[in-house]
């Protein structure tokens, strides 16, 4: 028998204990072990029931995702589950930790299910670009009805034991040791003469409006297809005999397995976990972190403070005046009341934070005891330098001094202190208590344990932390600035902001670049343009001033009610601002440009090419260590569609030679903007992909 399954006898019950750490994924060896275990139990004299239970953290976390994309190996999971269900013995699952995907499907193939109260179950395959592929779409609706089953499988959410029991997925919730619980439960079932109870033999549930559900779920997925296909699989289970429903489910599962979306989602799954795993930090102990200082209580500072407070840190926030301090306190209180409403914190915790865990001060000396301080003041070097000079004066030895700058030179900031090794960039994204991305900007002299502490902070704040090197805009804003420029060029050449936003929203972005600019505030881009013009723009670069005119007229986007769009009827009911196109047309006329039409496809192609080209430069220059670091930055900070995996995964899928050929075409029109990344040329010449670099970094 496989060493992944331990076989033991407890009276007339055979226990199959799964031992496949860390999360009991259903690898080939586990599947084979379960098969052999069932054979052995059925041949074992006197055995009347089989208990399946997991050792360690979980019952089963599902199919082994590392096997996806490789040739399938027998025994296949659906066949194994049918075999378990068809056993003449009574089969019981005892669940703890998570039972996800194939894990829950194994439990649904058992005749009875018991779980501890902390157990969670779910069918998260849609997060991998798939549908449940081992009977989940067929068995779950027979227990819960169609609507509840579709809710669970199309959202991929984890359902707690008590809710799962109410839905009919679990027969009994009992505290205690999962193995002992399972044995006791199986014993009581045998004692009561309980019959085998195969779910596949139960009547199918009532039908719903299948086409309506399919269309509604498809629309919700912003281009992601797998959630909608759950509907078709469930429909097959309701309309056809069990075996045919199962075959229909398998066909959809295998079709989805062959899609780019599946590749993108699985890349995102593993990259999300690899991103914080830096070989250079192996064995480096982070510094102790309990008390955090925040400087500046505007939207960003208050968001950072909120995030720190919600993660269990003590926080001291510095503002310049008592009035500003009061406003900051209010902002944080507002954020916390949102967390209270959503059940993220208890009333007691909420009150304790506001009365004793958060302190708002107006004097730098109050920061003498903090372990780490994050500055979130006005984005100007002279202001930052003043702050860091003060921090250097008051902070204790070993305290980490962090800047939340989004593009300024962290080396220059560090140089104004006597402890540059303690200085780091921690670039949060607004609203900082909501957005998942944290760019950890490592300056030339930053000590390793300071970097490790940055990652530790990110982990405790439940952020996706990405290591970035120093350059203008680091990883995210540098790439953003380039693809935004590509969009600006398309506007000059004939596309409208609305066509561009629509094309990119159809591509899967949460928002197009002009809607994003309105949300962030047009004054931000204006300030950057002014700074860059003051520093001197290369005469070969294309520039335009129509967006400045919007700002000069006081239109800063959503916060003033008008920008590229008019928000008079609310953010969701935005309409194009009629002042914008005349300004653009005036600019084109001034520059002597005859506008031409752009298809959505060309818009996406150029925009993405610009993004990939800059991303390749960022990786080539070592600003990002691996392509996956760029992918995770765009996914978690810039609304890039998860099902496409990230810009560099997208590039691999589309094909690097094809992208390079496009760029060479664009280069003929504008050789200055389309300077091709040497790394991209190199990968194409060597027949390699960005993912090859990820793999090489992991080796
Ligand atoms: N297969 C292979 N490896 C897995 C895995 C799986 N299903 N689930 C988790 N892992 C690995 C992770 O990659 C990670 O590896 P490293 O330590 O090398 O990075 C390790 O297990 C621990 O995982 P986490 O760091 O994510 O630990 P966590 O405690 O935060 O979360 C979890 C645990 C909730 C199980 C989470 O890992 C998770 O959601 N896993 C995916 C579950 C899933 O999607 N299952 C469905 C699979 S598809 C399926 O089953 C298809 C079908 O119908 C046949």
Image: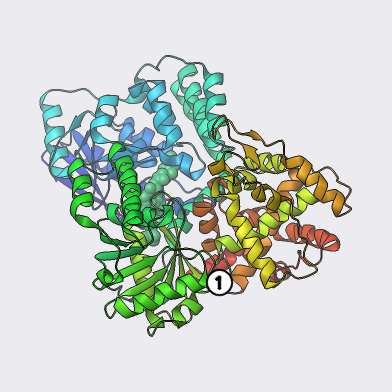
Please name the residue shown 72% across and 55% down the image. 486
Viewer-proximal residue among 411 and 35: 411
Residue 244 drawn at (x, y percent): 50, 24
Q: Is residue 118 above or below residue 675?
A: above
Q: Secondary structure at mark 1?
A: loop
Q: Is residue 39 above or below residue 592?
A: above
**Colour theme:** rainbow
Please name the residue shown 41% across and 38% down the image. 156
Please name the residue shown 70% across and 50% down the image. 549
Residue 502 drawn at (x, y percent): 67, 39
Residue 558 drawn at (x, y percent): 56, 41
View extreme (top): residue: 206
Viewer-proximal residue among 198 and 267: 267
Residue 526 drawn at (x, y percent): 63, 57
- Residue under pointer 1: 623
Q: Is residue 242 above or below residue 673?
A: above
Q: Is residue 83 above or below residue 605?
A: above
């Amino acid at each position: 028998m496989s060493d992944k399954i331990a076989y033991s006898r407890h009276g007339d019950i055979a226990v199959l204990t799964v031992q496949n750490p860390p999360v009991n994924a259903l690898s080939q060896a586990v599947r084979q072990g379960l098969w052999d275990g069932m054979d052995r139990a059925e041949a074992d004299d006197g055995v009347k029931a089989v208990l399946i239970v997991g050792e360690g953290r979980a019952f089963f976390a599902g199919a082994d995702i590392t096997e996806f994309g490789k040739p399938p190996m027998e025994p296949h999971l659906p066949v194994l589950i049918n075999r378990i269900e068809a056993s003449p013995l009574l089969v019981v699952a005892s669940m703890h930790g998570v039972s996800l995907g194939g894990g829950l499907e194994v439990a649904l193939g058992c005749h009875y299910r018991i779980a501890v109260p902390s157990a969670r179950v779910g069918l998260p395959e849609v997060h991998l670009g798939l549908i449940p592929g081992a009977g989940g779409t067929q068995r779950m609706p027979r227990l819960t009805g169609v609507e509840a089953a579709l809710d669970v499988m199309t959202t991929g959410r984890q359902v707690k034991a008590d809710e799962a029991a109410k839905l009919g997925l679990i027969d009994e919730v009992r505290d205690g040791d999962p193995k002992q619980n399972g044995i006791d439960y199986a014993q009581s079932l045998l004692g009561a003469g309980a019959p085998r109870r195969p779910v596949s033999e139960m009547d199918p549930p009532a039908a719903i409006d299948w086409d309506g559900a399919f269309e509604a779920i498809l629309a919700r997925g912003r281009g992601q297809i797998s959630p909608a296909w759950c509907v078709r699989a469930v429909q097959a289970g309701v309309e056809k005999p069990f075996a045919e429903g199962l075959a229909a489910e398998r066909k959809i599962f295998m079709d989805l397995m062959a899609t780019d979306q599946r590749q993108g989602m699985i890349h995102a799954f593993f990259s999300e976990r690899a991103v914080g795993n830096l070989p250079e930090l192996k064995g480096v102990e982070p510094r102790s972190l309990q008390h955090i200082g925040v400087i500046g209580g505007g939207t960003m500072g208050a968001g950072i403070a909120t995030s720190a407070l919600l993660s269990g840190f003590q926080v001291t926030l510095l503002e310049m005046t008592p009035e500003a301090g009061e406003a900051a306190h209010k902002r944080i209180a507002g954020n916390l009341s949102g967390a209270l409403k959503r059940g993220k914190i208890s009333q007691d915790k909420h009150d304790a934070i506001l009365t004793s865990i958060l302190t708002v001060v107006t004097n730098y000396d109050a920061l003498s005891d903090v372990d780490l301080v994050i500055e979130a003041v006005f984005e100007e070097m002279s202001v930052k330098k003043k702050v860091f000079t003060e921090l250097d004066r008051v902070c204790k030895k070993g305290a980490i001094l962090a800047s939340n700058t989004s593009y300024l030179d962290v080396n220059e900031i560090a140089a104004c202190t006597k402890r540059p090794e303690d200085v780091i960039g921690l670039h949060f994204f607004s609203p900082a208590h909501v957005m998942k991305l944290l760019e950890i900007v490592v300056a030339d002299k930053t000590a390793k344990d300071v970097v490790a502490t940055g990652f530790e902070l990110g982990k405790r704040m439940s952020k996706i932390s990405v290591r970035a090197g120093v350059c203008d805009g680091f990883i995210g804003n540098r790439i953003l600035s380039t693809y935004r420029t590509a969009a600006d060029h398309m506007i000059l050449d004939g596309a409208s902001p609305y066509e561009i936003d629509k094309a990119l929203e159809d591509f899967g972005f949460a928002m197009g670049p002009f809607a994003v600019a309105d949300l962030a505030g047009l004054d931000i881009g204006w300030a950057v343009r002014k700074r860059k013009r003051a520093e001197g723009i290369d005469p070969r670069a294309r520039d335009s001033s129509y967006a400045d005119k919007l700002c000069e007229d006081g239109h800063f986007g959503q916060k003033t009610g008008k920008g590229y769009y008019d928000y008079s009827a609310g953010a969701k009911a935005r309409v194009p601002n009629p002042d914008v196109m005349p300004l653009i047309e005036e600019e084109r006329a001034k520059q002597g440009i005859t506008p031409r039409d752009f298809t959505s496809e060309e818009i996406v192609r150029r925009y993405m090419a610009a993004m990939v080209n800059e991303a390749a430069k960022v990786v080539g220059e070592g600003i990002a260590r691996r392509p996956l670091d760029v992918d995770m930055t765009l996914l978690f900070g810039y609304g890039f569609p998860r099902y496409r995996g990230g810009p560099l995964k997208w590039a691999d899928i589309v094909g690097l030679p094809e992208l390079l050929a496009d760029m060479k075409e664009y280069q003929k029109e504008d050789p200055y903007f389309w300077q091709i990344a040497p790394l991209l040329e190199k990968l194409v010449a060597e027949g390699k992909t960005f993912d090859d670099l990820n793999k090489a970094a992991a080796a």
